[in-house]
């Protein structure tokens, strides 16, 4: 066991040479423990679901199976059956059990409840059976019951079998008899209702709309003609027809909206790019600091240091990746070449980068003439050590964020697996 622990410590130390070995090993153990707990919980839940789905609850009193309640679907049952004679092997069979059905007495009791339901719902928005002016409600079945309903009227032109009331052509009230048939399996019972249908109370606009639709319907029924002739006059008034114009306001608004979305998306992309740039600058800072300290200790001037670093970066830049810190040094060197003083060029570099550590470095370099190169090199060594410590903490934080992001796909996969297991279990009940 001790050999295995030492082996793991050595491997982890190789992967994180800058970190404390004990701290790295503890983080490794915590991650492995977390994953082990997740696996154990998932295994326990999986085992529970398997056991739960496999439990048989259909048998009652050894040889009885309860039927599904009234109105429900057939139930599929799977049983293991064998005779007491052990010479015959156990056999698994699957069969269906139909739901319970009502007898005639129960049907009659339900019909009485169905009549009450019909009386309560048929009027819809009408006030009474003696005065019907709008559509009726013909239900297909009695609510909370097994009874189905069929409707028939003796005057389909006035009240259809769907409950639609056509009273626009009526001059006086009309008596209509409605027959409701309650159906269940082989049983049926009828119920008669008498209503009076009155002409509608139409406004001028509603009356015109009805006559217009009626005239267009009559014109459309002449299907042998190639063209449909719309009515020229209605109630002595000449009709003028035109097609609706396309509203272009929406087509003007959509490009503006798309342009706004693209603009906002570009702003967010710039923010993300700036964040990546600042992270890279912070990561590069200790390396840049170390190079400046080495070159200054070799006797080079600040201008010479910036020239050396800029030329090396340009030689590597064509082949390597982009480094923002080295690009800023190159820009600062070119400004010095163009006649800008060292102090001003360094100050401008700090303002461009807008990161505290770089501003501090530029301040130290600009004060080189006041304190001397010996004091500057000592300060840079102290600052370089501090920068490496900050870099280790930042890299550690970025690693933890990446580990957290990796947990999300793992949790999604776990949820999908659980759903694949759970959904079929509940569908069997």
Image: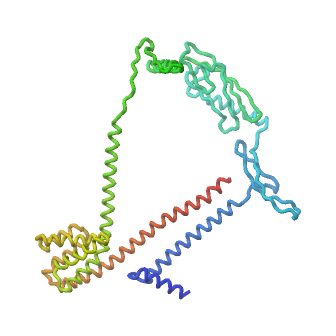
The residue depicted at 64 percent of the width and 56 percent of the height is 424
The residue lying furthest to the top in this view is 236
Q: Quadrant of residue 284?
A: bottom left
From the top left corner, tell me how far across and down residue 109 is, in percent. 74, 34
Q: Quadrant of residue 375?
A: bottom left
From the top left corner, tell me how far across and down residue 310 is, in percent. 22, 74
In this rendering, is residue 271 above or below 295? above
Q: Is residue 167 visible?
A: yes
Q: Quadrant of the N terminus?
A: bottom right
The residue depicted at 33 percent of the width and 62 percent of the height is 272
Instruction: Name the residue nearer the viewer: 394 or 420.
Output: 420
The residue depicted at 70 percent of the width and 61 percent of the height is 54
The residue lying furthest to the left in this view is 339
The residue depicted at 21 percent of the width and 78 percent of the height is 308
In this rendering, is residue 326 above or below 203? below
Left or right for 149, reference 347? right
From the top left corner, tell me how far across and down residue 133 is, in percent. 55, 21
């Amino acid at each position: 066991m001790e050999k295995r622990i030492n082996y793991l410590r050595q491997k982890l130390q190789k992967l994180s040479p800058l970190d404390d070995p004990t701290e790295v090993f503890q983080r490794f153990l915590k991650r492995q423990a977390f994953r082990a707990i997740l696996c154990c919980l998932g295994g326990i839940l999986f085992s529970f679901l398997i056991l739960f789905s496999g439990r048989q609850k259909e048998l009652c009193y050894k040889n009885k199976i309860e039927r599904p309640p009234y109105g429900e679907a057939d139930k599929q049952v799977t049983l293991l059956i064998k005779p007491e004679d052990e010479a015959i092997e156990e056999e698994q069979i699957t069969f269906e059990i139909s739901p319970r059905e009502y007898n005639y007495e129960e049907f009659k009791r339900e019909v009485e409840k169905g009549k009450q339901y019909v009386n309560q719902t048929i009027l819809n928005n009408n006030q009474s059976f003696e005065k019907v002016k709008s559509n009726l409600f013909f239900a297909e079945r009695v609510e909370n019951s097994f009874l189905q309903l069929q409707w028939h009227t003796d005057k389909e032109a006035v009240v259809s079998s769907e409950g639609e009331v056509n009273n626009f052509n009526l001059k006086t009230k009309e008596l209509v008899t409605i027959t409701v048939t309650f159906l269940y399996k082989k049983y049926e019972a009828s119920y008669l209702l008498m209503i009076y249908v009155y002409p509608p109370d139409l406004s001028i606009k509603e009356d015109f709309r009805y006559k217009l639709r009626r005239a267009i319907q009559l014109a459309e029924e002449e299907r042998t003609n190639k063209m449909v002739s719309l009515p020229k006059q209605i109630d002595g008034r000449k009709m003028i027809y035109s097609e609706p114009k396309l509203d272009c306001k929406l087509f003007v608004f959509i490009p503006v909206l798309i342009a706004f979305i693209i603009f906002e998306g570009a702003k967010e992309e710039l923010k993300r790019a700036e964040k990546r740039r600042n992270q890279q600058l912070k990561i590069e800072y200790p390396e840049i600091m170390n190079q400046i300290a080495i070159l200054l200790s070799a006797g080079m001037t600040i201008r010479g240091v910036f020239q050396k670093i800029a030329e090396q970066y340009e030689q590597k830049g064509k082949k390597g990746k982009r480094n923002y810190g080295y690009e800023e040094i190159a820009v600062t060197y070119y400004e010095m070449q163009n006649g800008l003083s060292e102090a001003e060029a360094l100050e401008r570099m700090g303002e461009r980068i807008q990161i505290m550590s770089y501003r501090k470095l530029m301040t130290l370099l600009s004060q080189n003439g006041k304190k001397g190169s010996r004091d500057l090199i000592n300060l840079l060594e102290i600052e370089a050590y501090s920068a490496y410590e900050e870099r280790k903490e930042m890299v550690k934080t970025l690693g933890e964020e990446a580990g957290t992001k990796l947990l999300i796909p793992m949790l999604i996969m776990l949820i999908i697996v659980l759903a694949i297991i759970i959904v079929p279990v509940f569908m069997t009940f």
